[in-house]
Image (cartoon, grey):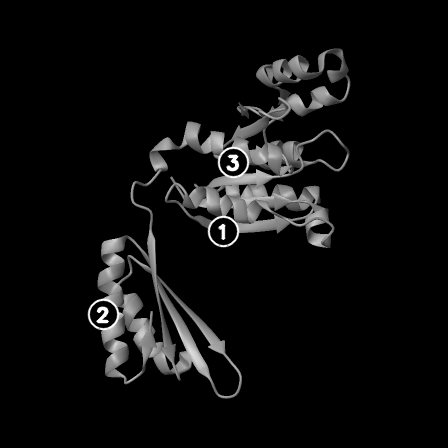
Amino acid sequence: MGDFGAIIIGDEILSGKRQDGHFRHTVETLAKRGLALNWCRIIGDDPALIIETLRQTYAGNDIVFCFGGIGATPDDHTRQCAAKAAEVPLLRHPEAVAEIEARFGAEAYPHRITMADMPQGSQIIPNPFNRIPGVSFRQHHFLPGFPQMAWPMMEWVLDTHYPQLRKQAPDTEAIITVYDTLENSLIDLMNEFVRRYPEVRFSSLPHIGEGSERRLELGVKGAQAKVEVAMAWLKKEIEKMNFKWTE
C-alpha cells in the first residue's frame, strides 16, 4: 500500500472563482486516523491533462482521492478520462443505475443516467446526499466537487476499504525556535540530523522579523518515542554551537 494523494479538478479553482476546501479537509480527515496526505495536484478541466495525470498516478501504488468532474455536464470529464487513462471501456454500472433510478425515477433519463458510466472494473461509492454514486477504481476514488457530498463519501471509503490503515498512535511533532541564526549556519547540523534519524521527518522554517531579528523554526515529526530521542540530540547540538532556543 502506498501513500495518500489528492487530485482536485476544476478550472474554477485555478481561476480563483471558487475557493478550494478539499485539500485542508483531506489533511484533517487523514490526520484523525493518524495518516498523512503525501501529495496534492490541482488541475483544470482539460481532458488531455486529466488523462496524463491519471496515467502517472495509476502507475504507482498510492491511494488517491480525486475531487470534481464526475457530473453529467459537458465540462465534466473525469469518469471518461479515468477509463481512457487505464485503456478500459466506460461501462454502465448496474449498481449505479439502481441508485440513480431510485433517486430520480424516469427523470434519470436521458442525461442523469450517464453518471452511472464508469471504467470497467469499478466499484461504486455511496452518496448519502443525493444517491448519485462516486467511483472506486485502481485505488483511485473519484468524488464530486461538492463538499457536502464528497466529504462523507471520503469517510466511507476510508472506513470501508482501508480500516486497517488507522493508526492507534498518530505521529507527534516537536518544534523549537532557534534565535540569531540563519539556515546556512546550521546546514551541516541538519544534514547530520537527517543521516542519524531517517525514521523521522525534519523541517526548517526561517523567520526574518523587523530590523536584524532572525530566528529559525526547526520541527521533528514521527512516532513519539523517536521524536523525543531525535529532538533531544538536536537541542544538545544546538547548545554546543552556543545558539539559544525555546519550545
Q: Residue at x 75, y 11 (%)?
A: 106
Q: Tell me which label, 3 or 1, sits earlier in the chain.
A: 1
Q: Residues within 10 Å of mark 3 (few under 14, many from 20)?
A: many
**Label 2 secondary element:** helix
Nearest the viewer among 157 and 148 is 148
> What label sits on residue 233 in the rendered view?
2
Q: Is residue 190 left or right of residue 17?
A: left
Q: Is residue 86 visible?
A: no
The Cα atoms of the two marked residues, 2 and 1, are separated by 30 Å
The x, y position of residue 54, in whole percent, is 57, 41
In the picture shown, does residue 69 fall above or below 11?
Answer: above
User: In the image, which is nearer the foreground, mark 2 or mark 1?
Assistant: 2
Determine whether label 2 and label 1 are within 8 Å by CB: no
Nearest the viewer among 33 and 183 is 33
Q: Residues within 10 Å of mark 1 (few under 14, many from 20)?
A: few
Give the residue at mark 3.
140
Q: In the rendered structure, which amino acid carries the disc numbered 3? A: His
Q: Quadrant of residue 237?
A: bottom left
The x, y position of residue 99, in whole percent, is 62, 16
Q: Tell me which label, 2 or 1, sits earlier in the chain.
A: 1
The Cα atoms of the two marked residues, 3 and 1, are separated by 14 Å
Give the residue at mark 1.
39
Q: Is residue 1 visible?
A: yes
The x, y position of residue 9, in whole percent, is 64, 44
The Cα atoms of the two marked residues, 3 and 2, are separated by 40 Å
Q: Residue at x 53, y 39 (%)?
A: 65
Q: In the rendered structure, which amino acid carries the disc numbered 2? A: Trp
